[in-house]
Amino acid sequence: MCSLSLCLTYLCYSLMGGTGPAALRSPAALPGSAAPGAPRSPTAVPVTAAPRSPAAPPGSAPGPSAAPPRASNGSREGAEGAWLRTPLAPGEVITAQSGAFERDPQESSTTDEELSRAGSPGSRGGGSSTTPDYGEKRLPQALIIGVKKGGTRALLEAIRAHPDVRAVGTEPHFFDRNYEKGLEWYRNVMPKTLEGQITMEKTPSYFVTNEAPRRIHSMAKDTKLIVVVRNPVTRAISDYTQTLSKKPEIPTFEVLAFKNRTLGLIDASWSAIRIGIYALHLENWLQYFPLSQILFVSGERLITDPAGEMAKVQDFLGLKRIVTEKHFYFNKTKGFPCLKKPEDSSAPRCLGKSKGRTHPKIDPDVIHRLRKFYKPFNVMFYQMTGQDFQWEEEESDK
Ligand SMILES: *[C@@H]1O[C@H](CO)[C@@H](O)[C@H](O)[C@H]1NC(C)=O
Ligand SMILES: *[C@@H]1O[C@H](CO)[C@@H](O)[C@H](O)[C@H]1NC(C)=O
Ligand SMILES: *[C@@H]1O[C@H](CO)[C@@H](O)[C@H](O)[C@H]1NC(C)=O
């Protein structure tokens, strides 16, 4: 018997170190590489999954989660447009949002350009035309903290259909990239809310950011956290596909996934793979938050049973169950459930990309190897969360 932490340590070292010196060539390859802000509690073990380790192993290309290039110049133009569309008046439901959902229904990563808009003086005060004059801006009481490509955008759009939720449409990245801007900056990014309404935002990279749990805890230790998780293998491929669509010149998935393919040695320092080691990241959060304060949403069930998953989300947030099956319909062409929108003419918002968007063909052998790689971490994650996400069953079906 060992504690979860020790088990994780063991898993990491056996995975990473069991195959000889090649595995240890780069310290960055170890999920256990020490990172600033490592967990403080006595149970802390050196397995903190260091996000965005700057020391990439030799020959590795920037992974899909590499931070997008910094906006060259802080063009403030269009800032208001971007942010004014975001807040929703109560009762407006989902009719007046930006096109973000359509643009990238599964997930969208906020660019630094969008971020500079967020922090720009131009977005301050919100301009009175679309921001309601009543209510006040509050720091969020609930956050969707991850994971990238898990379905966080879909969840945000669906929960926004609830009249007691007001959410930021773009990703503020406060607890990872913009923390030095301060809480007042963060509050200012938020939509106005009335008494009783919940303010939310989603930034999927929080889940893999070492400092995020501590920072969120120091903002408000009762912050509710939501994590949308999805089969890490599918997630990794989806992550890679998104990067590929922006940077067609990157190496193949197979090349990036292995440190040494002959040895079958997975490159766990590649962000597309590292993000999916959920147990490791969760360990970091559990240093600061009790499990009861974290809701794990199945990215898979969000698609197959959106109303069921949304019921859990609303219960968790202490909201009346208002977003129900009536809010969704299944669009066969899209292959995904979509949100019904009362009296609105713009395109429907669906909980996934259309089927047309194909993933690149990945060598089945590589997928098999990845499944094996993730399995112990998945099992650990199920134990830690007390939930079986059935990613192994899904795999054996194929
Ligand atoms: C940056 O500035 C240059 C020259 O001032 C301008 O042409 C360009 O459009 C700007 N880019 C952005 C992203 O604002
Ligand atoms: C992979 O490992 C094999 C066997 O140890 C070794 O011969 C080969 O040089 C390694 N390849 C790389 C790229 O490190
Ligand atoms: C379903 O999705 C297709 C493809 O995006 C779209 O053209 C069509 O209008 C949608 N149907 C409904 C009923 O929303």
Image: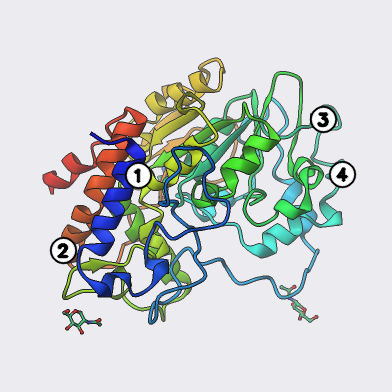
Mark 3 and mark 1 lie on one chain; the one further toward the N terminus is 3
Left or right: 246 with respect to 215? left
Residue 66 or 133: which is nearer the viewer? 66
Q: Which residue is tagged 4?
A: 125
Cβ of mark 2 under 8 A from ligand 2:
no
Give, as a three-letter code, the residue at label 3.
Glu
Residues at marks 4 and 2 touching, judged by CB atoms closer than 8 Å: no
Q: Quadrant of residue 291?
A: top left
Give, as a three-letter code, the residue at label 2.
Pro
Q: Which residue is tagged 3?
A: 136
User: How is colour applied across the structure in the image?
Assistant: rainbow
Mark 4 and mark 3 lie on one chain; the one further toward the N terminus is 4
- Residue depicted at 12% across the width and 45% down the height: 396
How many angstroms separate mark 4 from mark 3 (CA)? 11 Å
- Residue depicted at 29% across the width and 32% down the height: 383
Give, as a three-letter code, the residue at label 4.
Gly
Between circles 4 and 2, the one closer to the viewer is 2
